[in-house]
Image (cartoon, rainbow, N blue to C red):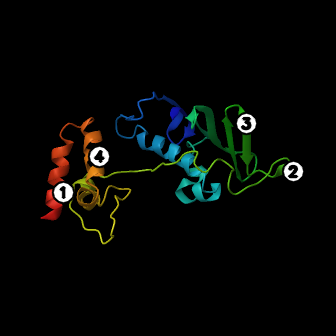
Amino acid sequence: MLEKLILHNFKSHKSTELNFDNSRLHGIVGKNSAGKTSILQALHYLSMITDTSFEKIFEHNRSPQFITTIGEKYMSVTASGYWENQKNCQVSYIWDHKNTNNWIAKLSWNIDGNKSSWTNEKLYGTYSYSPNPPLPSNFFQPTVYLKLIASNLAKAAYSEEITPRVELDGSLLAPTLDFLRDEAPDKFQLIEEKLSRIVPNVPDGMTKMVKMQTE
């Protein structure tokens, strides 16, 4: 369970701290260009560390020079909370542009007082290198980064897959709901119940969407 997230020089976030309660559902609200998406991205990159190497996570437009605040040479993202049987944990990743042409990566974690770290720096033989930092594989599981587009959520669509799935941008929601209604009505009803706690008219909207899909 995530309790705190701290961003330092991550994109537009010079110094941002977010605290979460145990409600398990949180909304990030703010004006346009306030950095809401950046917060989700920072957390998403952290969640990828258990099964993806730093080289794969932070490449192309996710390279440290592109995600670090302009003019800064040090960036960090730190998440803390508890895991499994209420184990206190803290995990952070750091990018540091020292007096070399390279960005130095560092990952550190503390699980119930058991501290460890990893870095890709190999200077003076004091650092080890591993393409896959040894965090538990289920440390952040399951996590999914979604950037839903409202128009994609609402429109009818067709999927050739036997079991359709909602795309990361919200596409294929209608055929997925249609499939669940016919093949897994219990899950369809559960989704309705959960969402209706947030948006009261969700059941009517879901029924209308499925009806449009089948017409």
The mark that comes first in sequence, 4 or 2, is 2
Secondary element at tag 3: strand
Mark nearer the viewer, 4 or 2 = 4
Residue shown at the point (23%, 60%) measured from the top left: 182
Which amino acid type is marked by label 1? Answer: Val
Which amino acid type is marked by label 2? Answer: Gly
- Residue at which label 3 appears: 115
Residue shown at the point (57%, 33%) measured from the top left: 82
Mark nearer the viewer, 3 or 4 = 4
Quarter of the figure with residue 90: top right
Which amino acid type is marked by label 4? Answer: Ile
| Rendered location of residue 125, percent (x, y) | 87, 51
Circle 3 Cα neighbour tier, 10 Å, few/some/many (<14 / 14–19 / ≥20)? few
Image height of 172 relative to 84, above or below:
below
How far is the residue under mark 4 from the one under mark 1?
14 Å
Report if the CB atoms under discs 4 and 1 are less than 8 Å apart.
Answer: no
Secondary element at tag 4: helix
- Residue at which label 2 appears: 125
Report if the CB atoms under discs 4 and 2 are less than 8 Å apart.
Answer: no
Report if the CB atoms under discs 1 and 3 are less than 8 Å apart.
Answer: no
Seen from the viewer's position, the closer of residues 98 and 79 is 79
Residue 10 seen from this side = yes
Seen from the viewer's position, the closer of residues 71 and 113 is 113
- Residue at which label 4 appears: 191
Q: Mark number for residue 180?
A: none
Left-right relation of 86 to 209: right
Which amino acid type is marked by label 3? Answer: Lys
- Residue at which label 1 appears: 210
Quadrant in the picture for the C terminus: bottom left
